[in-house]
Amino acid sequence: MPTPLITVEADVPPLTFDVPESFFTLPLAAKPGDRATLSDAFVRDLYSRGDESLWTPAAPFYAALAEQLALSGLSYSALGLFSTDSGGVAQCAFTVAAVETDHSDPETAAHGILVALSRDPHHDARWMDLPCGPAVSCVTMREVTLSPELTADHTEKQLLTGQIQVHVPFSTGPYTAVFTLHTASTEYWNEFCDGMVAILRTVSFSAPESVMGSAGQGRGGTDEPPLEN
């Protein structure tokens, strides 16, 4: 079932998209009671092999995190966990925000976004034609310095991180959906790019026939699909 964009802004038009089974959706919700309920389900799904001693203290942490994310303007946030052929786990963070852009034509808006993003030489900005309409992708790669206390051998290291951000102007109102995928598992960069494209091809601005009762129910458990390098 498509995932509806959940937002506290009543004027934002409908937006739905599909995400992989191994995306664990953070419990964004407008009401504290709803966040608490969703957080409890989230930690039980994310830590499926845990017990009450882990779930009970973890749930309030994720409820508070979800509140901060919602206040910052995010409407959807998920943690992607994928098993690798070597027995490890590749991770990514995925978010969606609806930003008011005051446009009347999505193609005009996309052209403006492309021009603005292309001004930064560190951006690889490109036009995209999606089933739902025009969009603009922007890829950035950055090296992050890890301090010695964060590494196994206690030496300073450089960590390469990558971000894919795609701006999709709504065809039904003056808003732009901003899809962002960030990962430090750059050895699987091609797979994450393919996954992002797969999500974007499911974006729809039509109202879903039946809205999920609780957006962000974590899915996947320990059955996450493998990534191949």
Image (cartoon, grey):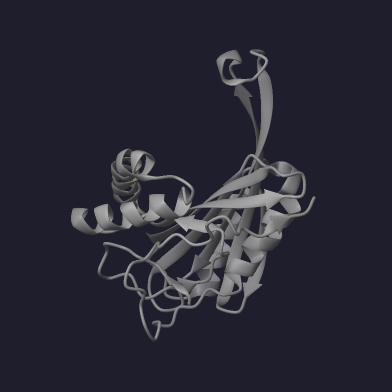
| Nearest to the observer: residue 78 or residue 13 | 78
Q: Residue at x 45, y 78 (%)?
A: 205
How far from the left and from the top, in percent, is residue 225? 66, 60
Q: Extreme right residue here?
A: 229
**125 up-or-down from 214: above or below:** above
| Nearest to the observer: residue 29 or residue 176 | 29
Q: Extreme bottom residue here?
A: 209
How far from the left and from the top, in percent, is residue 107? 55, 73
Q: Is residue 56 visible?
A: yes
Q: Is residue 26 visible?
A: no
Q: Residue at x 36, y 74 (%)?
A: 212
| Nearest to the observer: residue 41 or residue 11 | 41
* Quadrant of the image occupied by residue 148: top right
Q: Residue at x 27, y 64 (%)?
A: 9
- In-image side of 174 versus 139 (left or right): left
Q: Residue at x 34, y 44 (%)?
A: 52
- In-image side of 9 versus 204 (left or right): left
